[in-house]
Image (cartoon, rainbow, N blue to C red):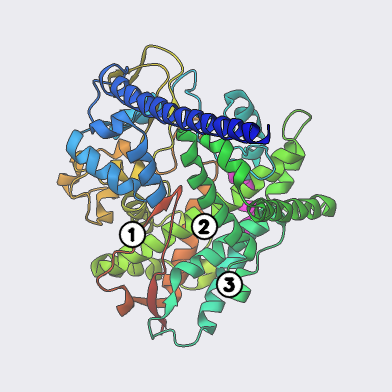
Amino acid sequence: MGGGDSLNSVGILKTLTTAAGWILTVSVAVIVARLVLSAIYNVYFHPLRNFPGPKFAAATPLPFVWRLLNGRMVHWNMMLHAKYGVVVRVHPDELSFIGSSAWQDIYTARPQLPKPTFGVLETPGGVPSIGTIPDAETHGRQRKIISHAFSDRALLSQEYILQKYSDLLIDRLRDQPNLQDGSLDICSWYNFVTFDVLGDLCFAESFHCLETAENHPWVASVFMGVKAAQLFTVFHHFPPMSTIVKFCLPQWVHDEAQKSFTFTRERVDRRIASKSDRPDFMKHILHNNYPGGLSRDDIDSTTTLLVLAGSETSATTLTSATYFALKNPTVMQRLVREIRETFKSQRDITVAAVSNLPYVHAVIQEALRMHPTGPISVPRQVDRPDVEVCGMPVPKGVRVGIPQKTAFRSPSNFVDPDTYIPERWLEGADPRFAQDDKAVFEPFMVGPRNCIGKTLAWVEMKMVLAKVLWNFDLELSEKMMGRDWSDQKVYLLNEKTPMYVKMRPRL
């Protein structure tokens, strides 16, 4: 009896093992078959089948995803558009355009083409910021409230904050030892000043980066969170992987995100509790808010975005403008001459005064063209038939966007696109620059979702650059020789590397 039971158990085990092996084999076969059939459909039957681009990118998201993972999306986009032209199919369901009319077709269309919910970066609090809200009506309502903080009147009242931290930057640079040994990373100092400014504008207290000469832990945490979130969106291309991966993330990842969110919430709490009437962002947001406008969770999420977007983008452009000017001595000489002939003292460098520096403006414009702060596409979803982009009918259900760096560096749009020439932006420029398609140059985006802080960014960048070059003579460090600082990986934001300079206080 016992022997029979044992044999029976062995038989059952063998049967189960065989069945499990068969199920696994069938599952793998089904997955492979599905992938193969999907690839065949994408290449030969998909509504985008007639758009130019590599077959592999049309067949599967893998080439697109790989560039997201390795941070080389910009290089890939440049290569594809150089080969295929104004439009490229970069993904089974996404088209990339670099023609100037695409800005109006995609980003100012009426009704608006929505932001895709696919691949949206999640916030630790679970509430989208104004930058990721998919609903146009909700976005418009919130933006109207926040816009009061960025009006011309608000900017004039905030000038003392810009003056305070730009002056502190100069003082702290003067305090640094060995300014002339080429070890000063000007990129970090630009980050310090812009983060302190935005911290003060959002929370009524800075991050004290200039005082400590270090990034605040919250700043480092937010940067890491953006990169991690960008990488996490990769799994959205392979459902249900995103759900599985999110469930399997170690607890410390969730803890770190929550700690960052708690930091923001505590500082917003303190700012609201202070009931201060200082003319910072929070004053305007609270004064113009109304029931149904911005919830407290909305304010927390959007404040984090304002700090990150308002500081990181300005610091990147300040660094690239300094880098490219130093790489081109005639540009630097003309830039310094305009600043030092315009201002007799540092006190003369005001918001109103820096707005009247045409060459400073051109230098920053050309830096934004060569190295935009939003280098990759921010796509929109085609949600209806009869949409045309650059004169081409685009089927419903696909994503469309403009990769800025590719568009700005394309020979189809600019003369000598890889050469830094601020003069192309000046009145009376060389006639050959009349061929430049300047309508494609929109570094702050266009339409209802364009950069809300554009005016502040321009004033801040001009003021900081003017004060640095009024006070110091700069030279590229030997550490930068043979390197292209602007050749950076991109994980939503540019992954900046140090930019070393020599500095001498002006005699």
Residue beneath disc 2: 460
Q: Is residue 70 above or below residue 166?
A: above
Any part of residue 98 in sight = yes
Residue 155 within the magenta-colored segment of the rendering? yes
Tell me the kind of residue under disc 2. Glu
**Number of numbered discs present?**
3
Left or right side of 283 for 171: left
Q: Secondary structure at mark 3?
A: loop
User: Residue sitting at 51 percent across and 57 percent down?
Assistant: 460
Residue 345, given in percent of the width and then of the height, sits at 49, 73
Residue beneath disc 1: 486
Left or right side of 351 for 66: left
Any part of residue 93 in sight = no
Which of the 4 image quadrants contains residue 502?
bottom left
Closer to us: 499 or 10? 10
Mark 1, Cα crowd under 10 Å, few <14 / some 14-19 / many 20+, is many
Residue 72, given in percent of the width and then of the height, sits at 34, 50
User: Which quadrant: the N terminus?
Assistant: top right
Mark 3, Cα crowd under 10 Å, few <14 / some 14-19 / many 20+, is some
**Label 3 vs label 2, nearer the camera:** 3
- Dot label at residue 458: none
User: Residue sitting at 55 percent across and 56 percent down?
Assistant: 224
Closer to us: 62 or 117? 62
The boundaries of the magenta stretch are 151-159
Q: Secondary structure at mark 2?
A: helix
- Dot label at residue 214: 3
Q: Earlier in the sequence, mark 3 or mark 2?
A: 3
Please identify the dominant SS of the magenta region: helix
Residue 143, given in percent of the width and then of the height, sits at 62, 34
